[in-house]
């Protein structure tokens, strides 16, 4: 759980800034961004399916490293979107947002699934609800602190509604933050898999 918490607080969450960028600069409708969230939920299901069919026997350290490398790679969607390189290849902003949302949510599910399954298997009978509540509380606290870090990065770079000149630099800082938890994988038992007991 310590690793999972660190994995949240070391990554600046710039999702609010990206929302404003998508609505103010790209002029995407709020209803379309709602659709992108639905596509993101489909990505969660794809991530669950992928984990259960292909990754649950893999060592947990390897799965988490793979998830973070893929998460950093998925941020290329944001880099391409903010740099407007997608237009040079004839790829619409809508497609970039939909693809990025589905991919990042699927990859985040690859991080979450092993912990949920392992926690369920290692949990003593009778306290499953308490352990799940603790796990989700740690998850929510980490996410909140990651959002504060994202707000701090945005403030330091003068990224705000109507001012997105340094957004690309903010995303690059976010990508660097994604790699930090890999250095703490020693907190995960070496031989643990998603099917260990």
Image: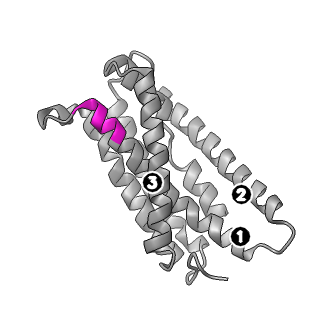
Q: Which residue is mark 1?
A: 120
Disc 1 versus disc 2: distance between alpha carbons?
11 Å
Residues shaded magenta? 92-98
Using the image as rendered, state which of residue 95 and residue 150 is in the foreground: 95
Q: Secondary structure at mark 2?
A: helix
- Choose the circle earlier in sequence order: 2 or 3: 3
**Which sits earlier in the primary sequence, circle 1 or circle 2?**
1
Q: Position of residue 115 (x, y in %)?
A: 62, 66
Residue 97, magenta (yes or no): yes
Q: Earlier in the sequence, mark 3 or mark 1?
A: 3
The image shows residue 30 at horizontal and vertical percentages of: 45, 22
Residue at image coords 38%, 50%:
103
* Rendering coords of residue 107 (x, y %): 44, 56
Q: Which residue is mark 3?
A: 106
Q: CA distance from mark 3 to mark 1?
A: 21 Å
Label 2 packing within 10 angstroms: few (<14), some (14-19), many (20+): some
User: Which element type, helix, strand or loop, lies under badge 1?
Assistant: helix
Q: Quadrant of residue 23?
A: top left
Q: Is residue 197 above or below residue 68?
A: below
Camera-nearest residue between 150 and 23: 23
Determine whether the residue tagged by mark 3 lies in a helix, strand or loop: helix
Q: Which residue is mark 2?
A: 135
């Amino acid at each position: 759980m310590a690793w999972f918490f660190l994995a949240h607080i070391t990554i600046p969450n710039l999702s609010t800034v990206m929302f404003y960028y998508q609505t103010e600069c790209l002029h995407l409708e709020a209803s379309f961004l709602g659709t992108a969230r639905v596509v993101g939920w489909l990505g969660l299901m794809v991530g669950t399916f992928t984990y259960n069919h292909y990754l649950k026997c893999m060592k947990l350290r390897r799965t988490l490293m793979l998830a973070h490398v893929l998460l950093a790679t998925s941020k290329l969607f944001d880099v391409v979107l903010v740099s407007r390189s997608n237009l040079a290849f004839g790829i619409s902003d809508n497609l970039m947002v939909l693809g990025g949302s589905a991919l990042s949510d699927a990859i985040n599910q690859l991080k979450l699934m092993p912990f949920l399954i392992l926690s369920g298997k290692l949990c003593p009978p009778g306290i499953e609800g308490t352990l799940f509540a603790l796990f989700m509380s740690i998850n929510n606290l980490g996410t909140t602190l990651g959002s504060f870090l994202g707000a701090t990065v945005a403030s330091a770079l003068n990224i705000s509604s109507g001012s997105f000149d340094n957004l690309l630099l903010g995303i690059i800082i976010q990508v660097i933050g994604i790699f930090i938890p890999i250095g703490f994988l020693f907190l995960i038992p070496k031989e643990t898999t998603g099917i260990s007991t």
